[in-house]
Amino acid sequence: MLVFGLTFMASLASAQAAPPQPPRQSNGLALTPPMGWNSWNKFGCDINESVIRAAADAMVSSGMKDAGYQYVIIDDCWHGERDSNGDIQADPKRFPSGITALADYIHGKGLKFGIYSDAGRKTCAGRPGSRGFEYQDARQYAAWGVDYLKYDWCSTGSQDAKSSYETMSDALRASGRPIVFSICEWGKNQPWLWGETIGNLWRMSGDIYDGWESRDGHYNGMTNILDMQVGLESYAGPGHWNDPDMLEVGNGGMSFEEYKSHFSLWAVLAAPLIAGNDLAHMSKETKSILLNKEVIAVDQDALGIQASRLVKNGDDEVWVKPLQGGGRALGLFNRSKQTHKIGVSWEALGYPATLELRVRDLWSHKDLPRTHGSFAADVPPHGVVMIRVEA
Ligand code: GLA
């Protein structure tokens, strides 16, 4: 009797226990850092379907598509109200042709289409968020042909970050459409610790400011965000990237040399390269930065390793990104206002000192003399010399 009772209780307990969940798998997308354009840094809320179409047109005509840029992403402020079924609608004044037509237009150019929502009840600009509508919104995005979702963190009150992002991650998967998931939680809850199988990229800072460093209450100048990357290298890899925020190249707050540094450093960081300028009106200088295919190739290297800061000597820094095939991309970075000679030895890079290496300058697009032992270059003020070394 006693044996029967124990067996009965044990089987009751096992009937009630939740079935073990298989470990979450990543969605298999964004095996190299996503590349594209997003409306926010330049246009803020001042968007409509012509602005987005013009960006898609320019992405093709400027050569950006051929250089690897792919996603055309509408940020905040596209939304209208939810309809009587709770389905989210686009703002009919700004997007009179509807989102399906816009997505078709973008797809027709061989590009991909991204959109924005928020894990709370409202977006950062006060439009309807997805809280409580996650599955319904994910279904709607899939029906529209969305390929990428940036998911923000405003109006979230006491919501738990990980589970909020898990809910939308599950909803996107349930939609049946492959959708890159961009976690935009500003690093508040250390998304690098939990984001790998939930999303494909995660912001690790507040919004980027189009300036060299913090100023006048703007905290996240380009170099400030760069500093926040130190220590996060090991969390990045194919399918899951630290996101130091969208590019400001071409928006006017930094010099040509500083924008070259911004782009070079984002590339060695294996950062998403999401342009944030007005693509339809780019200067020659801006194009020469965004279209530097040798720098882009470093960002897109298949190994997907984020650079570490190997040297920090006052204003002189050396960032090193291991590449497929045994090479390294180096960013020799000068934060000072004078030209500095910055160098690095082969041994510090993990090569034998006697090894002769090929050296390629990725901004002058020239092979430099093969060299052994070390490499040094004059780096202009606020500038980067970016080279690729390989046997
Ligand atoms: C937050 C995000 C920005 C942008 C705005 C839109 O601040 O971090 O990148 O999406 O919201 O309101």
Image (cartoon, helix red, strand yellow):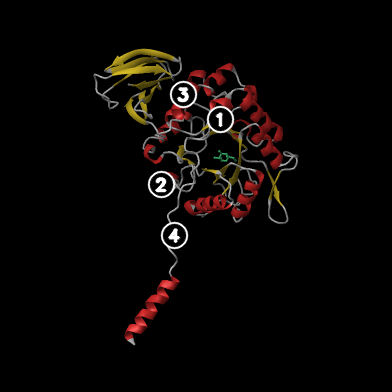
Amino acid carrying mark 3 in the image:
Val
Q: Could you say which is closer to the camera, residue 381 or residue 248?
A: 248
Crowdedness near tag 1: few (<14), some (14–19) or many (≥20) residues, C-alpha within 10 Å? many
Quadrant assignment for the N terminus = bottom left
Quadrant assignment for the C terminus = top left
Q: Are marks 3 and 1 in contact (CB under 8 Å)?
A: no
User: Separation of disc 4 and disc 2 at Cα?
Assistant: 20 Å
Chain-order first, disc 2 or disc 1: 1
What residue do we see at 68% from left, 29% from top?
Answer: 54
Image depth: mark 4 or mark 3 in front: 4
* Residue 295 tag number: 3
Q: Is residue 298 left or right of residue 137?
A: left
* Residue 193 tag number: 2
User: Separation of disc 4 and disc 1 at Cα?
Assistant: 37 Å
User: Separation of disc 3 and disc 1 at Cα?
Assistant: 13 Å
Chain-order first, disc 4 or disc 2: 4
* Residue 69 tag number: 1
Chain-order first, disc 4 or disc 1: 4
